[in-house]
Amino acid sequence: MIKITNKDFSLDDLYSNIKSHKNGAVSIFLGTVREDLFNEKESIEAIFLECYEDLAIKQLDKIRTEAIHKWNLNNCIIVHRVGKIPLGDKIVFIMTSSPHREESIRSNEFIIDQLKTKAAFWKFSQYGDDSKIVEAKEKDLEKNLKWKDVIKN
């Protein structure tokens, strides 16, 4: 399941979609809006996320499919919000399930590392009436290099 939404989502509802007697492990990544400083005097009030939905769905589906095949997952759910999201609210949710924990944990890490740099989302930090685009971080780009043996071109 892949979902892009401008609404908040329920963790319990998502778990009910992945729950199975075949699972020995379920791993979750939940990204939230954290407080960052815009400058020495102003802190972030919210973020605003945009995406090219058709392209983002295709990119997320490719990432999800790679993870399912590489780690033999039973299931994988990716939910990403768009629009204005206040401090502390949920942004992105990844849930993977597998017979064993190592596959579930590694695949979950792979998915978020890929999503951060390869999916068509644009993030803006909002500070009052001002906003600033959030550029890809060098560390996120470097994390992709460790997955080069997994990624199919």
Image: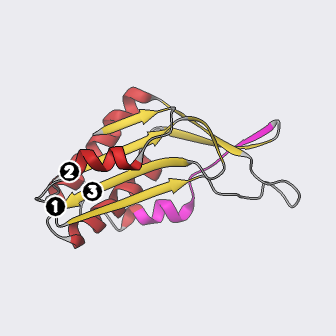
**Residue for badge 2:** 75
Q: Secondary structure at mark 3?
A: strand
Q: Secondary structure at mark 1?
A: loop
In the picture, the disc for residue 23 is 1
The answer to whether mark 2 and mark 3 are in CB contact below 8 A is: yes
The residue that appears at 52% across and 47% down in the rendered structure is 91
Q: Mark 3, mark 1: which one is toward the viewer?
A: 1
- Please give the range of residues in magenta: 130-143
Q: Mark 1, mark 2: which one is toward the viewer?
A: 1
Give the colour scheme shown: secondary structure
Marks 1/2: CA distance? 9 Å
Q: Tell me which numbered mark, 1 or 2, is placed earlier along the sequence.
A: 1
Disc 2 residue crowd, few under 14, some 14–19, many 20+, Cα 10 Å: many
Q: Position of residue 114 (x, y in %)?
A: 38, 54
What's under tag 2, amino acid-wise? Asn
Q: Position of residue 73 (x, y in %)?
A: 17, 57
Q: Position of residue 63 (x, y in %)?
A: 29, 48
Q: Tell me which numbered mark, 3 or 1, is placed earlier along the sequence.
A: 1
The residue that appears at 46% across and 65% down in the rendered structure is 142
What's under tag 1, amino acid-wise? Asn
The answer to whether mark 1 and mark 2 are in CB contact below 8 A is: yes
